[in-house]
């Protein structure tokens, strides 16, 4: 399984270790609302620090598109990380340049510093050589512990590995081992549930996924895009109308592969995207033009649960509704609890992944019963598709 070097092979004592982690955590008003991704990277940070390495954390937050953006700063994450780690975590408000260089050069063995969002620079997503050089100048060794960002060939997830001795962190290692164990040879029927909001970045993955699973349950913003592609009016819902052709092609590919596509038949709608907004349940064919679908309705949940009853393996990324806002968490919570119950009863192997998906499972009190909960969303789906992940491949090189 481990075809790359791990921390067992690394000499980190006295070295500046550029450690890529995924701190893209759910956050509301500057407060971290789910700490799972932070929790998962603690063992690697501790191990390097205890071995006398100088830990320089690289991470992204949100999609700031190459420009600094106060709403996507990693600054609020540093104190949370420090508290969970039980040791101080410095913060540099730029990930390259004199500010970063100054803080890194002042580090002592065992110290930890978090650098500001790598995506504040265009060079990150472009994997630009000058940006990679600038990051590389801050370290002697590179460790990638961000499995959940390994589907991105970015400077901090891929580029750096070409410049420095490179190793997989403990979470990267554990994620790959757990996914292989849970899903390497899954018992059929396999049901995939894909929801959430990242429609354009995930829809293409469904094309291959339908040939690997027996049913694809589509929820969240993704479902709205599929409903609209069928000519159903979704009002003001989150929906990527320009992806209608892609959605129709996926439905055709599913038919050819014998994979059932399960879409919502009813929806909880509201006119405002806020907690306690007046809401009603309607047939998906009756969504008014000025309303938004914010959750799947009870009939849809019943259908999802029937599919879960038939399944032997569940793969889940993306909530079925806007679960952070009451009462639009109902479908996600109900399906999560049903999957947890089936797993507890030994009837289902359930693997879920994604920053918000994990938060939703925690909110439903279901995470502990799932067979495995990955921190990865998009990366997990790509792994499931059988696609090589650039951040993993480069570690094997
Ligand atoms: N009908 C909907 N309308 C608007 N937002 C929705 C709807 N359904 C789900 N969402 C939103 O989708 C978001 C989560 O989607 P996302 O694709 O980011 O999942 P994830 O588990 O975080 O995966 P990843 O780790 O890849 O980001 C949540 O913030 C949720 O509110
Ligand atoms: O949340 C995720 O799935 C990872 O942090 C990757 O984020 P991205 O989809 O913005 O690249």
Image (cartoon, rainbow, N blue to C red):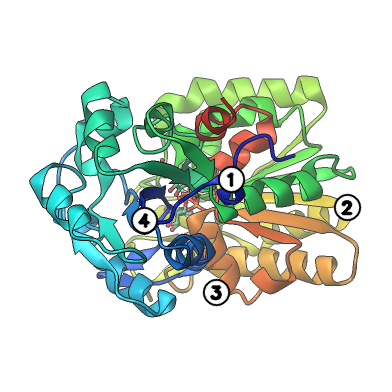
Residue drawn at (40%, 58%) of the image: 53
Q: Nearer the viewer, residue 317 or 52?
A: 52
Nearer mark to the viewer, of 2 and 1: 1
**Which of the 4 quarters of the picture holds residue 227?**
top right
Disc 3 designates what residue? Answer: 363
Quadrant of the image where one finds ligand 2 = top left
Cα distance in 3D space between marks 2 and 3: 25 Å
Of the residues under marks 1 and 4, which one precedes in the sequence?
Answer: 1
Cα distance in 3D space between marks 1 and 3: 38 Å
Residue drawn at (77%, 40%) of the image: 215
Q: Which of 5 and 211 is in front in this view?
A: 5
Using residue 239 as the reference point, say whether residue 297 is left or right of it.
right
The disc placed on residue 105 is none
Of the residues under marks 2 and 1, which one precedes in the sequence?
Answer: 1
Residue 279 lies, in percent from the top left, at 44, 68
Disc 2 designates what residue? Answer: 310
Disc 4 designates what residue? Answer: 14
Query: Vertically, is 45 above or below 6?
Result: below
Of the residues under marks 3 and 4, which one precedes in the sequence?
Answer: 4
Mark 2 and mark 4 in contact? Answer it, CB < 8 Å. Answer: no
Using residue 181 as the reference point, say whether residue 381 is left or right of it.
left
Mark 2 vs ligand 1: CB below 8 Å: no
Residue drawn at (47%, 42%) of the image: 149
């Amino acid at each position: 399984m481990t075809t790359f070097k791990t921390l067992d092979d690394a000499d980190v004592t006295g070295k500046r270790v550029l450690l890529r982690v995924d701190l893209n955590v759910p956050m509301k008003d500057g407060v971290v609302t789910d700490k799972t991704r932070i929790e998962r990277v603690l063992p690697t940070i501790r191990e390097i620090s205890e071995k006398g390495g100088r830990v320089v954390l690289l991470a992204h937050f949100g999609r700031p598109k190459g420009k600094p953006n106060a709403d996507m700063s990693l600054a609020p994450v540093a104190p949370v990380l420090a508290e969970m780690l039980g040791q101080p975590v410095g913060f540099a408000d730029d990930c390259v340049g004199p500010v970063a260089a100054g803080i890194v050069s002042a580090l002592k063995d065992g110290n930890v510093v978090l650098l500001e969002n790598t995506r504040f620079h265009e060079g990150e997503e472009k994997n630009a050589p000058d940006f990679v050089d600038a990051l590389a100048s801050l370290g002697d060794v590179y460790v990638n512990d961000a499995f959940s960002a390994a589907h991105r060939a970015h400077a901090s997830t891929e580029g750096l590995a070409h410049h420095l001795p490179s190793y997989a962190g403990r979470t990267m290692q554990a994620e790959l081992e757990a996914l292989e164990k849970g899903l390497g040879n899954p018992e059929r029927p396999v049901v995939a549930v894909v929801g959430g909001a990242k429609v354009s970045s995930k829809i293409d993955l469904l094309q291959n996924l339908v040939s690997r699973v027996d049913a694809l349950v589509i929820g969240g913003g993704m479902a709205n895009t599929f409903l609209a592609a069928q000519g159903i009016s979704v009002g003001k819902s989150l929906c990527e109308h320009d992806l209608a052709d892609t959605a129709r092609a996926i439905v055709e590919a599913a038919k050819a592969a014998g994979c059932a596509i399960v879409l919502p038949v009813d929806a909880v709608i509201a006119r405002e995207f806020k907690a306690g907004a007046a809401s009603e349940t309607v047939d998906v064919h009756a969504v008014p033009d000025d309303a938004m679908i914010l959750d799947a309705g009870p009939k849809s949940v019943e259908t999802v649960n029937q599919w879960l009853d038939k399944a032997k393996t569940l793969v889940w990324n993306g909530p079925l509704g806007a679960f952070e806002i009451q009462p639009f968490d109902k479908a996600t919570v109900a399906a999560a609890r049903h999957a947890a119950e089936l797993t507890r009863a030994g009837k289902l192997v359930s693997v879920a992944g994604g920053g918000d998906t994990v938060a939703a499972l925690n909110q439903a009190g279901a995470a502990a019963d799932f067979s495995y909960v990955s921190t990865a969303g998009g990366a997990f789906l790509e792994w499931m598709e059988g696609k090589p992940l650039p951040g993993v491949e480069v570690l094997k090189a």
